[in-house]
Image (cartoon, rainbow, N blue to C red):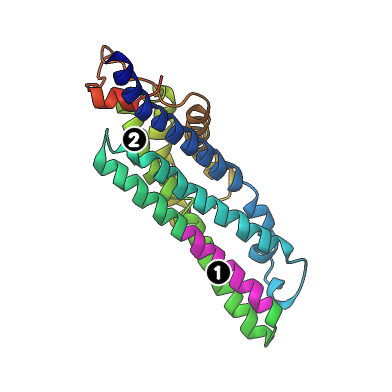
Amino acid sequence: MTTTTTQNTRAPMDATRKAALAAGLFYIGTFVFSIPALGLYKGVLDDPSFVLGAGSDQGVLWGGLIEILTALTGIGTAVALYPVLERYGPGRAIGFVASRTLEAATIFTGVIAVLAVYTLRQDGGDAATLTTTANALVAIKDWTFLLGPGVMPAINALCFATIMYRSRLVPRWIATAGLIGAPLLLISSTATLFGGWEQVSSAALLMALPIATWELSVGIYMTIKGFRTPDATEPDAPVVTAEHAALAQV
């Protein structure tokens, strides 16, 4: 009887550990893939004559591929975490899946805009028309960069980090970084929206550091440690039912 009970408990615990590992690797993937894309896009985004055939265009294709991977790994985090998060906050778990999916869709829209400029460059045509169209597509890319990576990580954190803070499935300092980073990122993005500073600037970088710390640290923690078992004796700790305990990993 004891052996059977242990085996039945271990199965969901193993599943939760696998979910944490997958989510952690996906989180690290989103962090790593998001770094090089801007550098690879530099020509198409900064050079108005790019569409007319000036400069190398290979970075556009690589940048598009990397951003696609960023979007897909972002969705992967939500899919991997949903079975665990719904036990602690069903509404926020759904919100996390929705916000990650919307973020990915916004990234895909930006990729399509950049690849369209690449196609115009290959096809050629009237210089004035090409330049005007390319500028419009680059403007779309700029806005998707603000509304996707510039806003949605804050929404993700408000859904995910609040569950982690309340459940203590990860150390509270990690969740706190997300809770601090979310409003700071929203403030920074709002400032960019109204012309306060550029999205790629020292001020924006400083405001984005807490959310970056949150995403990297929670990804590493889930990969290496999995999820903690909440301690019901801690202040403000949630009530841990047998169902919750079966889902938590020490």
Residue at image position (27%, 26%) is: 244
Residue at image position (42%, 23%) is: 173
Q: Secondary structure at mark 2?
A: helix
Residue 28 is covered by the magenta coloring: no
Q: Residue 114 in the image: x percent, y percent?
A: 59, 67
Query: Residues in magenta?
Result: 106-121
Q: Which mark is residue 66?
A: none
Q: Which mark is residue 113?
A: 1
Label 2 CA crowd tier, 10 Å (few <14, some 14–19, many 20+): many
Q: Earlier in the sequence, mark 2 or mark 1?
A: 2
Q: Residue 167 in the image: x percent, y percent?
A: 31, 26
Q: Residue 33 in the image: x percent, y percent?
A: 60, 47
Foreground residue among 138 and 114:
114
Residue 37 visible in the snapshot: yes
Residue 75 as seen in the image, left or right of residue 56: left
**Quadrant in which the N terminus is drawn:** top left
